[in-house]
Image: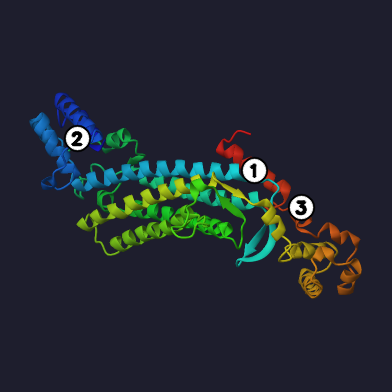
Amino acid sequence: MGSKAHASMLASQGLITAGDRDIILEGLDQIERLIQEGKFEWRKDREDVHMNIEAALIERVGEPAKKLHTARSRNDQIVTDLRLWCRDAIDKILIRIKQLQVSLVMLASKYVDLIVPGYTHLQRAQPVLLPHLLLSYVEQLERDAGRLVNCRERVNFCPLGACALAGTGLPIDRFQTAKDLKFTAPMKNSIDAVSDRDFVLEFLAANSIAAVHLSRIGEEWVLWASEEFGFLTPSDKVSTGSSIMPQKKNPDPMELVRGKSARVVGDLMTVLTLCKGLPQAYNRDLQEDKEPLFDSAKAILGMLEVCTEFAQNISFNSKRIQSSLPAGYLDATTLADYLVKKGVPFRTSHEIVGRSVALCVSKNYQLAELQLDDLKAVHPVFEADVYEYLGVENAVNKFISYGSTGSNQVKKQLEDWRIQLGISS
């Protein structure tokens, strides 16, 4: 792509003839077909991809091919290729992110009314609707997509024509090559053009954050699939057995997602360390940016694909979840809200509810099982309407703030995401 655009520009500027351009383009087309068919001979004595293609072109079309390297260097070729590659990789990752988001929204739609325990510090905190939890993953993924979209905007500037580092004295048109390669514009500074790897770092950083999000989903689903939780069951399609224990059903795919995140974060650290001590402009050290870059993109694409497949092949165990809800006094905060509505300062409400929970512990009761007289003994402000706030169903229904886990709010969030992702009702 870069060589074709460069050849066309050289002809437009009169630096090669139109005839030479056509011969070069035809030769490049032939080489491209050989590469796509796996028939191109890559020779190590020709050092790199660029010299392999140029030497093969000279062998095929002769003298005109020797004019192709006019007003360019391997330095600007390398980074142009790298920006084109990153641009394509970002586009592929964005597609995979959306696929996972769609799968999560579809999964949430199957369990619209299912209440699950919400956790902080991995301790039971408040009741939440399962779709609310699943949509929190969708929100994280949307930010991941946004970072990649922003990164792509900065990737999309063209270094070609910066040559080795100083530009050229020949009358090239860098705006033409940038346009032909669908870049926003040529890079403004030739030294920066060949030495900049910020776009690689930014891409790897965006991948790392996405990998951490996917790892957190993996961790949560592995926990939920355990016998201790029993909230989630993966189908046989996305689980494995044990080589020795026939009863086992392991959520291996999400464990692998969790593990792969370490590679993606490590790839970022590799290139950060690579770049930290480099003087301007191009240095050969920068050839070492390729392996971590390619590895990061491959890993994140795989992680997204596995998460999507897993989300499409799990079920939530409603009865087990519902039977677990009484543990942990999940309606305690809603009871504090009740007291606030009665005019009790929140700090006082917090203390009153704490004493109410202590009473429950002593009687082995749930809050909803306390008699009104018991509650009045804790504080006289309690009235019969308190029972409208107790129990996880009542507690969830009392949430009304924007973005909360209240039924109306969650249904609106779900519908908004269906519209945004183009999911038909």
- Residue 220, given in percent of the width and then of the height, sits at 55, 58
Q: Earlier in the sequence, mark 1 or mark 2?
A: 2
> How far separated are the C-alphas under marks 2 and 3?
65 Å
Residue 334 placement, left or right of 37: right
**In this picture, is 169 found above or below 267?**
above
Q: Is residue 128 visible?
A: no
Reading the chain from its start, which is encountered first: label 2 or label 3?
A: 2
Q: Which residue is mark 3?
A: 397
What residue is drawn where x is 36% and y is 52%?
A: 296
Q: CA distance from mark 3 to mark 1?
A: 19 Å
Q: Residue 159 occupies which quadrant of the picture?
A: top left
Give the numbered dot on residue 110: 1
* Quadrant of the rendering where the C terminus is positioned: top right
* Image coordinates for residue 78, horizontal then vertical, percent: 24, 46
Q: Which mark is residue 39?
A: 2
Q: Is residue 336 visible?
A: yes
- Give coordinates of residue 206: x percent, y percent: 43, 53
Circle 1: element type: helix
Picture residue at 10% right of the left edge, 47% below the top: 45
59 sits to left or right of 10: left
- Tell me the amino acid under the disc marked 3: Asn
Earlier residue among tags 3 and 1: 1
Identity, as a three-letter code, of the amino acid under mark 2: Lys
In the picture shown, does residue 117 fall above or below 108? below
Disc 1: CA contacts within 10 A as few (<14), some (14-19) or many (>=20): few
Q: Secondary structure at mark 3?
A: helix
- Image quadrant occupied by the N terminus: top left
